[in-house]
Structures are given as structure tokens and as C-alpha cells.
Image (cartoon, rainbow, N blue to C red):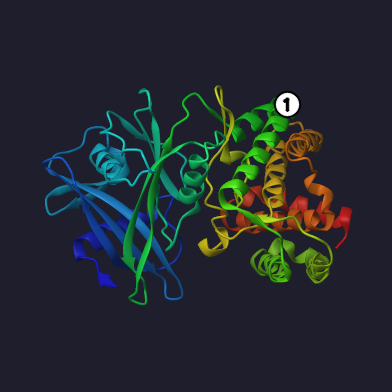
Amino acid sequence: MTALEPGLDHLLATWMPRQRWYPAKGRGVSQHLLGSMHLDAPEGVRVEVLVVGLDSGDRLDVVQVPLTHRGELLVGAEAAVVGELDGRHVYDGPHDPAYVGALLASLRTPEGTRPPGPPSSSRVLTGEQSNTSVVVDAEGPNPLVVKVFRTLHPGENPEVTVTAGLTAIACTRVPRTAGWADGNWTTGEGAVATGHLAVAAEFLAGSTDGWGDAVAAATAGTDFTRQARELGAATAEVHVALAEAFGHAPADDSTRDELVSGLRARVHWALDSAPALADHREALERHARSLVRLRERPLPDLQRVHGDFHLGQVLHSPVRGWVLLDFEGEPLRPLSERTRPDVAVRDVVGMLRSFDYAATQGTAGRGWAQAADEAFLAGYSHTTGHDPREHDRLWRALWLDKALYEVVYETHNRPAWLAVPLGAVTRTLANFGA
């Protein structure tokens, strides 16, 4: 690992911890330069992409920091100023058209397509957390959204490979992939790692996000079953397309053991990570022991899945209907786990848990969520020809697994929301036993 220049080191140490995507909040870290590259830029502007290691002693987070250096101020980008260095103004790259244009020109594209042309306009979407998304030419005939990955992992990012694979078989339930960027950096051990840096896909103008639609309906007490049924059918279409694009296979003894071990480990991880689960320790430990019974019954085939499916990962397009986004998987899981074949039931459970969250934002209550659940399952079952609850023991285990993940997430990120998944854990243990 290489030390950053003192001026740049100070600049980033001051600026990065204030960013929503910064993965080392609350931890003391030392910064190291793991890689850098320069992109072609207009005269008077320097565009560089830094890969920075955040070393906290027992953990190394790797982040991507695109920067632009300008002699003159960039009008309208005051909120994106990183600081001043060597008499030049330094900006967060995604907010600077010079970086966006340079990135687009450097993209690798699907076979038979060309990189997008120079952008006429771009804007950063608000509300991002682990990544930064930029909408390009929103008013043009072929608008794009470019996702710049902030936390990097070696290997193939499923957000790139999955959407590209579905684009290749003309699946209309995901945005078409326009291109992607990858790069190299050194690891803490001095080896060279390769991973994806960004991906560009079509921007579906006029779409509404599923979370906003569902919360609005729950708040007003409005029926959401038609939308939920259509979403269930769209989800099933994507699962069928994923199996076509990436294959599927029966679960053998090894994968059964791996599934049981993973679910059991998550129970213990949750108990260790969330004090609010203390009252349920005995029941959860009993449940963990009972998971061995999953080896006794057939499991659904294993295939690629979404991995972190909820209402915030879908859009409703007036032209295309429901469209699925963000195939990166659960952010708290290692990338190696997120790319493994899994059971599609995991995605179904994730969406139903999301209906539970949406219901708590309004006055509709559990009845609203249960009606949405049944409608979603009806749409899914009609498309696939089977009810995902037919594997009842697996269904219960995955439902509880997702709720436990949410308890840990809310404990560390949104304590005010903790009651939602904790209530689900309580109901599940009471209704189904352990």
C-alpha cells in the first residue's frame, strides 16, 4: 500500500467521512492509495480515479474516489467541492460533467454496441448510500443512469454481470445495460485485484419507485393488491429469465449443508449483534438446531437471484410496468456470497417483508400488508405454476432469516425502525414455533 500525498491525504480525511457512502463511520482509519488512473478530459481539467484503502487495523475497506481538478470554479457544483489542492479546485467527480463524459467514453459495452456519446447534461440522484448514481441526458431520446460503485470488491459485481446477462436475452423487466467500467488495485497483501467500478443502464423516465407507491397507498389506506399481483408476476418473469441466462441446478448434499450452515450462522450472528433479541435467545437457538431438518426434504433448484429484493429495488414504468433494479445483493454480505446460486424463494420473502415495512408507514396496518402478500404470491404462483410456500420449512427459515438480518441492520443504522423487524421475529416465533 502507498501513502497518499500529505495534502490529498488531509483533504480526503476531512471530506470522505461526511459522505453517506463512507463505509468506516465511527472508526479510526489510516488511508492508503491502492490504485489510480487518469481519464481523458477537456483542456484545463484533470480527471483522476483513486482507489483508497481505509485500514482500521482489523478491516480494510476499499473505496473509489473519482476527482476532478479545475483552475476555475465549476458553477452550480458548490456542494460537490472536496477542497483546494495545489491552487486548484477539487470536486467530487460524479458532480462534474468532465468526469461523467470521460467515464462514458471509457465504458466497455455489450457486443455489437458502442459507448454512449458525450453527455449534454447530467445530475446526481439524491438519497444514495453505498453508491452514487448519475442521470445523463434525462431529456434526450436515450437517457442513461450511471452507477458509480463507491465500496469496491475484487471480482465480478452482480449488478454488472446479472443485468448484462438479462439484457443479452432481451428481458424487459430490467433496464438495458449500456456499458461498464472496471479497474485494478493492490490488496493489503500486495496482490493485484480486479473489479467493476461503474455500470451504465437505460434510465426509465417517468417511472415511480415501488416504495413510494406502496407507502402512499398504505398511508391512504388504499388497496394495493393489483400492483402487488403484477409485481409478483414480474418477479417470477425475472426468476425464469435468470434461470435461462445463468442456468439452474438441483441442490445436492453439499449445498444443503451450506444452506443450513449459513442460516444457522446468521441466527448466532444476529444474537451477537442485536441486544434487542436477548428475550428470544432460547427460541432462536432452538430454531437454529432445528434447521438440520432442511436436509430431510427436497429443496427448490438453485439459481441466480436478486439477493436484496424489496420495494426500493423496483420501479413502475408507465410503458414497461414493473422493472427490477440493483442486483448487488445484501450489502452486509461478502461479494463471494452474493454471487452464489441461491433459492428464488429468498427474493419472494424479501418483498413480503418490504410490504410489512410499508404498512407501518401508514394507518392501514397488518391487514393491508397481508392482502398485498397474498396478491404478490398469487401473481408469482400464476406465472411459475407453483406456490413458493410449498417448501414450508424452508419458507419459515428464510422468513426468519430475513427478519433477523433487518433487526441487525436497524440496530446499527436506523434504531427508530427496529420495532418493525423485531415485531416480525416475535410473530414468527409465536405463530410457527422454533
Specify the quadrant that holds the C terminus. Answer: bottom right
Specify the quadrant that holds the N terminus. Answer: bottom left
Q: Position of residue 52 (x, y in %)?
A: 32, 62
Helix or strand or loop: what does disc 1 sit on?
helix
Which residue is depicted at the point 56% across and 22% down? 318
Q: Amino acid at mark 1?
A: Arg
* Depth order, front residue of 409/345: 345
Residue 332 visible in rendering: no
Which residue is depicted at the point 43% across and 34% down? 202
| Number of numbered discs visible in the structure rendering | 1
Q: Position of residue 418 (x, y in %)?
A: 67, 52
- Residue 173: name its quadrant: top right
* Depth order, front residue of 21/312: 312
Q: Is 88 located above or below residue 135 in the figure?
A: below
User: On the rendered structure, is 126 left or right of 46?
Assistant: right
Dot 1 crowding, Cα within 10 Å, few <14, some 14–19, many 20+: few
Which residue is depicted at the point 81% across and 48% down? 389
* Depth order, front residue of 52/10: 52
Q: Position of residue 186 (x, y in %)?
A: 32, 69
Which residue is depicted at the point 79% across and 66% down? 284
The residue under label 1 is 226
Q: Position of residue 142 (x, y in %)?
A: 38, 27
- Residue 211: name its quadrant: top right
Residue 205 visible in rendering: yes
